[in-house]
């Protein structure tokens, strides 16, 4: 079989498995987030302590990413991805048994540690294997898979919670994750594909797409960390931090806003899912647009629209109008990440990229951990509306920052087209 077909087959297989893991990995966190108002009601928590449960989960996820990316380089991607999902699912089951805030905080944090495996390792797999000219579409598919989990799991978790309670709901989704993690490790091991071909492209090898190889990247600490161009990588990471803060607040406090308007468990799950249906659509659209027109215009337009959308949400009334609005808001809130993930790939060394992605995703998830905690304090003091307004204004810092990025990424220059 020609080498091109072999590489395409490997990419297809890796993308299929990575997408499946992404469904469960993001789905579990989304389900936990959607159920937070009912956890808070059962455990008698205010906004700040309820938000702290998500913050602890995301903080642990953030802190685990760089160590787990390094571990994957030693023991293989399959072992870390599979074991991470088993750990994540088991901790979610234990969260469902928590009788106190302290135990819920502990199990939520441990669940986050298991969740930390996927993003740096799975994203780097696909980024390194894909042709740079179509990388945006490949990462768009991978991101869309995560949003499938984000909208399917909250809807399912809400339905189960409506009949059996939030505890039974978390046990159900957590158990399914643990089972999938075991299946993944066995299937990839039996297929002889324990670690996807991360080193298919060796340092110094000619690259038909013209992308610079590892041998031609910058030296020093940045090179050892897998960063090809430190300045634009840092700017892109800061932009992602601001973007993620707005997204995290929208996702954390939307369920509380819905409960305040009289929605029950099942309805909250469905409405939360609609936000993420829009998010999945937005990631696909923005992945394609990024390949067509570049990262900067996509980031600028979606961030301005997201700020307007978060403020506009506060004035929407009526179930049907709110349902439609949440789909549109999801496109704006989640679509930007495809442009960011594609853009940062141009500044990452393809041979050492898991470390660079570990840094990048650690920054974004740290933002996702801190923002809800700040939002909870604002909500306790000034109400839910103030949270949405404050973080909407924060996202407006992003558009000016895009002008600190190079007009053309290395991928664009090398390949001659995106």
Image: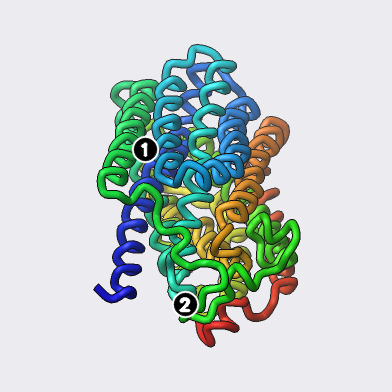
Q: Quadrant of the N terminus?
A: bottom left
Q: Which numbered disc, 2 or 1, marks the residue that appears first in the sequence?
A: 2
Residues 209 and 179: in front is 209
Residues 143 and 35: in front is 143
Q: Residue furthest top?
A: 99
The nearer-to-camera label among 2 and 1 is 2
Height in image: 17 above or below 219? above
Quarter holding residue 51: top right
Residues 245 and 74: in front is 74
Whether residue 68 is visible to the viewer of this picture, yes or no, is: yes
User: What label sits on residue 359 in the rendered view?
Assistant: none
| Residue at the disc numbered 2 | 133
Q: Residues within 10 Å of mark 2 (few under 14, many from 20)?
A: some
Residues 208 and 13: in front is 208
Measured as percent of width and height from the top left, residue 77 is found at 44, 46
* Secondary structure beneath label 2: helix
* Secondary structure beneath label 1: helix
Height in image: 40 above or below 300? above
Q: Residue at x 52, y 17 (%)?
A: 43
> How far, Cα to Cα, is label 2 from label 1?
41 Å
Q: Residue at x 35, y 31 (%)?
A: 178
Height in image: 350 above or below 3? above
User: What label sits on residue 267 in the rendered view?
Assistant: 1
Measured as percent of width and height from the top left, residue 121 is found at 49, 50
Q: Residues within 10 Å of mark 1 (few under 14, many from 20)?
A: some
Measured as percent of width and height from the top left, residue 356 is found at 62, 55
Q: Residue furthest bottom?
A: 416
Say whether residue 51 is left or right of residue 266. Answer: right
Q: Residue at x 46, y 22 (%)?
A: 95
Q: Residue at x 47, y 48 (%)?
A: 317
Say whether residue 393 is left or right of residue 311. Answer: right
Height in image: 133 above or below 62? below
């Amino acid at each position: 079989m020609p080498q091109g077909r072999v590489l395409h087959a490997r990419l297809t297989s890796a993308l299929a498995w990575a997408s499946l893991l992404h469904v469960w990995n993001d789905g579990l966190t989304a389900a936990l987030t959607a159920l937070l108002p009912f956890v808070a009601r059962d455990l008698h928590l205010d906004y700040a302590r309820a938000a702290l449960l998500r913050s602890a989960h995301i903080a642990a996820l953030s802190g685990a990413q760089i160590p787990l990316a390094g571990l994957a380089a030693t023991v293989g991607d399959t072992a870390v991805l599979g074991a991470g999902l088993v750990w994540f699912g088991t901790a979610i089951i234990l969260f469902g048994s928590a009788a106190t805030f302290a135990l819920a905080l502990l199990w939520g944090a441990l669940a986050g540690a298991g969740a930390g495996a996927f993003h740096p390792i799975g994203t780097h797999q696909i980024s390194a294997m894909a042709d740079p000219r179509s990388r945006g579409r490949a990462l768009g598919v991978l991101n869309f898979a995560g949003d499938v989990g984000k909208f399917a799991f909250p809807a399912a978790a809400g339905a189960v919670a409506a009949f059996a309670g939030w505890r039974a709901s978390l046990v159900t989704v957590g158990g399914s994750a643990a089972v999938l993690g075991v299946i993944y490790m066995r299937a990839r091991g039996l297929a002889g594909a324990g670690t996807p071909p991360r080193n298919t492209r060796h340092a110094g090898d000619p690259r038909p797409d013209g992308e610079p190889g590892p041998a031609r990247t910058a030296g020093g600490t940045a090179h050892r960390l897998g960063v090809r161009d430190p300045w634009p990588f840092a700017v892109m990471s800061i932009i992602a931090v601001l973007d993620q803060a707005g997204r995290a607040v929208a996702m954390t406090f939307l369920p509380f806003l819905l409960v305040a308007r009289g929605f029950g468990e099942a309805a909250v799950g469905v409405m939360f899912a609609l936000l993420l249906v829009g998010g999945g659509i937005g990631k696909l659209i923005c992945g394609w647009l990024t390949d067509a027109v570049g990262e900067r215009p996509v980031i600028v337009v979606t961030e301005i629209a997201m700020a307007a959308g978060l403020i506009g949400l506060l004035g929407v009334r009526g179930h049907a109008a709110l349902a439609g609005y949440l789909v549109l808001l999801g496109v704006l809130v989640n679509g930007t990440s495809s442009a960011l993930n594609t853009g940062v790939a141009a500044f990452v060394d393809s041979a050492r990229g898991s470390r660079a992605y570990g840094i990048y995703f650690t920054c974004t998830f740290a933002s996702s951990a801190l923002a809800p905690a700040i939002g909870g304090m604002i909500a306790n003091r000034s109400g839910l509306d103030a949270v949405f307004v404050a973080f909407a204004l924060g996202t407006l810092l992003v558009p000016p920052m895009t002008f600190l990025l190079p007009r053309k990424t290395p991928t664009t220059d090398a390949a001659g087209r995106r």
